[in-house]
Image: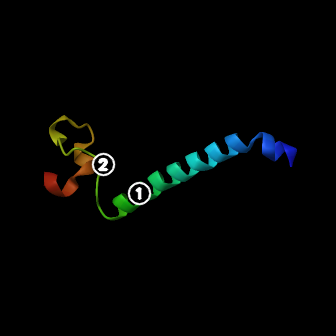
């Protein structure tokens, strides 16, 4: 119990970081499944333009 009391601040910060990272990953997965992209749609300067927007390049 004393170890837990001594490290309570570190444990709380770690739990907050895990929660924030989990929410960010969940949002990325949700956006990916709904077809949203994180690109700025300036495909003229993008090295991945051919693989990113296959339908719009045809």
Location of residue 40 (image quadrant): top left
Q: Is residue 9 left or right of residue 32?
A: right
Percent across and percent down for residue 27 are 41, 57
Percent across and percent down for residue 16 are 58, 48
The residue under the point 26% across, 37% down is: 47
Q: Quadrant where the C terminus lies?
A: bottom left
Disc assigned to residue 39:
none
- The residue carrying pointer 1 sits among few (fewer than 14), some (14 to 19) or many (20 or more) residues within 10 Å by Cα, namely few
Please name whichever residue, 48 or 10, is drawn nearer the observer in this view of the structure.
10
Disc assigned to residue 27:
1
The residue under the point 17% across, 41% down is: 42
Q: Is residue 24 above or below residue 3?
A: below
Q: What colour scheme was applied to this rendering of the protein?
A: rainbow
Tally of numbered discs: 2
Marks 2 and 1, how far apart at CA: 11 Å
Q: Is residue 19 left or right of residue 31?
A: right
Q: Secondary structure at mark 1?
A: helix
Disc assigned to residue 38:
2
Q: Secondary structure at mark 2?
A: loop
């Amino acid at each position: 119990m004393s170890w837990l009391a001594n490290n309570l601040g570190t444990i709380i910060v770690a739990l907050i970081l895990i929660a924030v990272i989990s929410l960010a990953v969940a949002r990325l997965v949700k956006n990916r499944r709904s077809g949203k992209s994180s690109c700025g749609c300036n495909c003229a300067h993008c090295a991945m333009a051919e693989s990113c927007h296959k339908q719009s390049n045809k």
